Amino acid sequence: MNLTERRDWMGLLARAAPARLAELLRDLPAHDFARRPEIGTVMVRARAGGTGAAFNLGEMTVTRCTLRLPSGTVGHAYVQGRDKAHATRAAVVDALMQDDPDTTRATILTPLAQEAEARTATRCAKAAATKVEFFTLVRGDN
Amino acid sequence: MYVAVKGGERAIDNAHAWLAEERRGDPAIPDLTVPQIREQMTLAVNRVMAEGSLHDPDLAALAIKQARGDLIEAIFLIRAYRTTLPRFGASAPVDTGAMTVSRRISATFKDAPGGQILGPTFDYTHRLLDFALMAEGEVPAAPQAEANAQDTPHILSFLDQDGLIERALPDDTPPRDLTREPLELPADRALRLQSLTRGDEGFVLGLAYSTQRGYGRNHAFVGELRIGTVEVELNIPELGFSVEIGEIELTECETVNQFTGSKTEPPQFTRGYGLTFGQCERKAISMALVDRALRWQELGEDFVGAPAQDEEFVLSHCDNIQATGFLEHIKLPHYVDFQAELELIRRLRTAAMEG
């Protein structure tokens, strides 16, 4: 993940564990809220048969927030769950990525991305260990 | 008929205080924390999220604690909480084909590309109580193996390529929403799927079982059952593009069912579909069977009078919060109604004895 597209880093921040993000961004820079952190839901849709007509599966909790740094840069966040501090930090990082992408990427996003990849890799490795290797015991002649 | 009466306040307050004490249980035993429930009673949490129709593991765990483990009561709490939240929008339909799978099995194809992945399953356990769990101890780490970055396409897509199964073509018409408008019949498939995925697991299981036993039989094979995580994307109007707002675990079941065909179409397999929040395998399979049974009209089959084919019956009764609300209300005071009945029967008896 090269994290150059805004949608990539916003997605990574949305999935981040709030406590981990707080570790990586201990001190929040000054900011003004354009929209204070607000808890709500998003209706998750799916498709019948996996690929067919859309239907409503159920809602998930989401927290959103919009803020402005002293530089005037606006940061947005939509994050899974009900953690307002998480949404605030995600919006701050979104704004910082526009002002100072290199430092922000190196200190916050890259560690988050690497940890997320490692978690997925571990889960896939455990799944792979439960993959069935069929072998034929007896096969008839015809 | 309901008449307002007073006088129960003190009794109710004291009952609630006792409930709180009973919920806590023996104070000599450590208090159960919400994170413990979330991490160790995961399948209960998943069921509460699926039937509460709100994906939030922390809230589901809290509801289970508050409800003393009564899952329907917990679902009730989640449904009530959900109504207090504003809705920011609807996601793009999730792509279950791109799921990061932790389990993926097929009962129809042994050698499906991507393989059969058992995942953390109870299948093949001996269902013997494990007394070792009564003692505290470390759990050894699960073995790992090299994962190749092979895609795990939907298994039914192979039948689809050969034209052997009915197609499931995309349709982005905004689906009707049970939580926004009252259920109106006839329902379309989208509304039925929404209703079934939040329906009571026991009720949907019972109906699915009835189809297997012959009440609207539809010869289901589990073409594929998969559990894993998918990304959820939401279009953000203020940004003008869509972003991933999170990752959720889902269970999906696709069934391959008996044929349909006509003068213009050669015989084809048909599909049933089940999808739930979390790991709810029994529910997803049940949902797929009932979904298929409810499609009799669309597929030109006979209505044999089976409960699982009857849309009105299924959709009106599968919601356990509606059901328990109506059922449990009969334990609340009905003194005046009953008084009327009592007088009526006295009059009838007097008339009968005099006559």
Image (tube, rainbow, N blue to C red):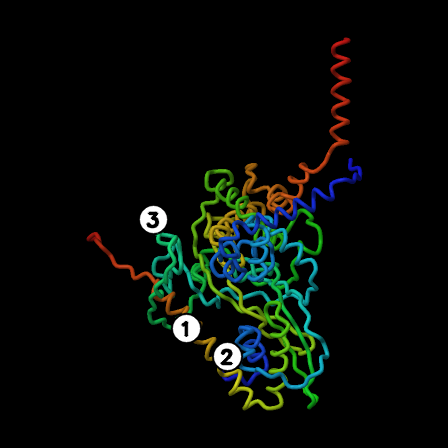
In x, y percent, where is residue B87? 68, 64
Identified by mark 3, the residue type is His
- Indicate the secondary structure of the residue bearing disc 2: helix
Can residue B324 be seen? Answer: yes
Image disc number at residue A66:
none
Sooner in the amino-acid sequence: mark 1 or mark 2: 2
> Would you name the residue on which mark 3 appears?
B126
> Would you name the residue on which mark 1 appears?
A121
Mark 1 residue crowding within 10 angstroms, few (<14) / some (14–19) / many (20+): some
In x, y percent, where is residue B204? 54, 46
Q: Are marks 1 and 3 on the same chain?
A: no
> Would you name the residue on which mark 2 appears?
A112
Mark 3 residue crowding within 10 angstroms, few (<14) / some (14–19) / many (20+): few
Front-most of residues B303 and B116: B116
Front-most of residues B245 and B286: B245
Can residue B263 be seen? Answer: no
Identified by mark 1, the residue type is Ala
Residue B335 falls left or right of residue B153: right
